[in-house]
Structures are given as C-alpha cells and as structure tokens.
Amino acid sequence: MDTRLIKVEDTAAIRDEELAGAAQILRNGGLVAFPTETVYGLGANALDETAARKIYAAKGRPSDNPLIAHISCMEELAPLVSEIPEAGRRLAEAYWPGPLTMVFRKSAIVPYGTTGGLDTVAVRMPSDPVANRLIRLSGVPIAAPSANTSGRPSPTTAQHVWEDMNGKIEMIVDGGPVGIGVESTIVDVSGTIPTLLRPGAVTVEMLEATVGHIEIDPAIQGPSGEDFHPKAPGMKYRHYAPKAELTLVEGEIDSVVARINLLVEEKNAQKCRVGVICTDETKSRYHGALVRSVGLREKEETIAHNLFAVLREFDELQADVIYSESFPEDHLGQAIMNRLTKAAGYHVIRV
Ligand code: TXA
Ligand code: MG
C-alpha cells in the first residue's frame, strides 16, 4: 500500500479541504495517522469492527488490548456509553478537550472489536486542532491507539509514524511535533470510585481537585508478583521500549552520575555501544558514551516532550545498552517515570 503524507500548513488556521481526504478514508474504513496533543494516533472508525481490526494488524498489537474512541465534542459522548456518572461529567467539564481519557460502561453500538471484548469503552476528546477537526469532519468516533509499532516508543512526530507505518496505512497527517509527548491520563469512572489506570499530563492532584479522592491501580507501579492484572490491559506489555537494554539509575544525582560513569566504563570494556539518558544540567558530566539530554530537570514538561524521541534515537544509533537518570515522581514526573520504568522492563538500580 502507498502511504500518503500530507502536511497541515498552519494548524491555527486549518481549512476543511486540507483534511477532507483524510476524513473520507476514515469514513470508508481506512487508516489515517494524525497528531494529537499527547502523541500521534492511528485512527479508524471506532464503530466499524473491520476497520478496528486493521489497526491491530498495522501495529502488530495483541487484540485483547482495547482502543480509545476519540470524539470532538460533548454531544458525541452519550451515544457511546450506557451512562455518564457524575465524576465523568465533572472531569469532562474540567479537562476536556485535553489529555484525559475516561473509561465508561459501553453502549451497544460500540463493537467488542474496539474494546478488546470489554463491556467498557475508553473515550477521549483531544484538544489538538488537527485531531479535533479531523474527527468532526469524519462524522464518526475515531478509535486511535498511539501510531507506533506495538512495543516501540510512541511517536511524537510524523517522521516517527512514517518509520513504523509506511506502507501499512492509507495516510499520515503531519501537524508538526506534538506538545505534551506522553500519552493521556486514563481514569476509570465506571465504578464507584474513579481509578487512575495510566498517569499522564492531567495529574493525580488535578483529578482530586475535581472529584476528591481517587484510587490508583497498583499495576501502575509495575508487576508485583504473578497476579499482575492491570485494569488497562495495555499496561501489561513491555512498551515504549527501545531496542537496547535500558536500566534506570535512581538516587541522589551526584551518586547517580558517578554510578552511570562506572557502568559505562564496564560496558565499554565489553565492547558494547553504550547510551546515557540525562538532562541539560548533567550532560557534560558523562564520558565515553552516546550521551543524550531529554530536557531540563527543572522543567519536567521538557522531559515528557523529548523522552520518546530520545528512546527512538538510540534505536537509530544502535545502542546495545542504555543507562538513564531517573526523575522525581511528582506531577508530570509520575507519567515520565511510569513510561521510563516500563521501557526499562522495571530494571532499576538504586544508589
Ligand atoms: O494519548 C493517548 O491516549 C493516545 C492518543 C493517540 O490519543 N492514545 C493511546 O492509545 O495512548 P493506546 O492504545 O496506545 O493506549 C490505550 C490504553 C491501553 O493501555 C489500553 O489498554 C487502555 O488504554 N484502555 C483502552 N480501553 C480501555 C478500557 N475499556 N478499559 C481499560 N483500559 C482501556
Ligand atoms: Mg500505545
């Protein structure tokens, strides 16, 4: 299949004509990748089981891993869900459109092919103007996982999508690099107490400011034994992962730098290509490795923004092993550390 790449020239002044072809493909059951404020998504008609199946094939994704249905306005929620609980209504008012996904009990029109066989459906209303306009023009809810090959880091530029999806999907809409860089927060509002299933840019503090106490799915912290059954099925797969073996080094920053430099020396002696993930503040303190900064320790949004691109860059550089600094788990740091520890297969050295 030939994959068409189209570019939206000015995302602040999109013309419907620019996205008409993409919307047509989606209505006809095809696949279109598009930008959102979190990561690029791989879209298909969420109400068309055959179209949803194509997403799983293009990504190489296990079919028990459900898709998020994306909508463009509040009126599009009711038809997809059997009820809108009070917490869901309040969170939608506070954070939609934006980087928040909510899990509701599904209505009959949402096929099990979209929900991975579950009786619930995850719904998100993105704020990105390209995403929002494309969903509205297509006239159907759009199922969209991150537009990466399953297991690879999520794409934050159209170029990343091209690397993974060229030849497998009809179209990629390039709207430039995304803003946030890590996937949306997922909250299950289908039970009595809202439960966080995946941390993201809408933080625990922000959620609790709106609906009071929330539960946190223990699976977010990683596997805790044999009965590891995250409520978001996708959280159980090794994910976001570079090809190299990644290890996180956690502790006070001077000790972390010293330990990573030692590990680099050891691995160099074994003739490995070694990578280091650090920050602008510490970059000059590493030696003898491929050193990449993810941003400013002081500004965690810069780290979220660059993280997946840096993981992908190490694939290109063909690193064998990567050592990464770790980051405080407050606010957005929770999402950053969740993705990093998953990418590392929960391999953490504490110093
Ligand atoms: O930011 C995002 O959410 C991006 C953009 C494209 O919107 N999408 C995204 O989709 O990250 P994906 O498929 O890569 O991750 C969706 C996650 C998976 O972990 C999946 O298991 C979970 O959402 N999920 C989907 N439906 C669910 C449901 N009904 N119950 C629990 N978890 C669900
Ligand atoms: Mg994903």
Image (spheres, rainbow, N blue to C red):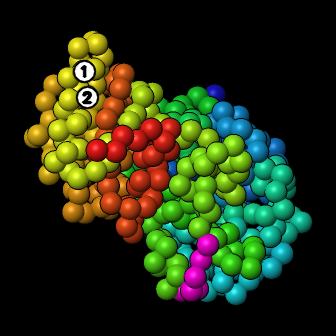
Check disc 2 and report the residue beneath it.
263
Q: Amino acid at mark 2?
A: Leu
Image vertical order of residue 269 relative to residue 42, above or below: above
Instruction: For label 2, count other residues whose C-alpha is less than 10 Å away and answer few (under 14), some (14-19) or many (20+).
Output: some
Q: Residue at x 48, y 42 (%)?
A: 346
Check disc 1 and report the residue beneath it.
266
Question: SS class of the residue under badge 2?
Answer: helix
Q: Please indicate whether residue 327 sits to the left or right of residue 51 in the image.
A: left
- In which quadrant of the rendered view does residue 317 lie? top left
Q: Residue at x 59, y 67 (%)?
A: 216
Q: Residue at x 84, y 62 (%)?
A: 119
Could you say which is closer to the camera, residue 147 or residue 292? 292
Q: Is residue 298 magenta?
A: no
Which quadrant would the N terminus be assigned to in this image?
A: top right
Q: Are marks 2 and 1 in contact (CB under 8 Å)?
A: yes
Could you say which is closer to the camera, residue 309 or residue 336? 336
Question: SS class of the residue under badge 1?
Answer: helix
Q: Which residues are magenta?
A: 210-215
Q: Residue at x 28, y 13 (%)?
A: 270
Instruction: Mark 1 and ligand 2: say if the CB distance to the nearest ligand atom is below 8 Å.
Output: no
Q: Outermost residue toward the right? A: 108
Instruction: Mark 2 and ligand 2: say if the CB distance to the nearest ligand atom is below 8 Å.
Output: no
Instruction: For label 1, count other residues whose C-alpha is less than 10 Å away and answer few (under 14), some (14-19) or many (20+).
Output: few
Q: Name the spot of residue 309 as percent of width and height, x first.
A: 36, 42
Q: Is residue 153 visible?
A: no
- In which quadrant of the rendered view does residue 351 lie? top left
Q: Name the spot of residue 244 as percent of width and height, x first.
A: 41, 27
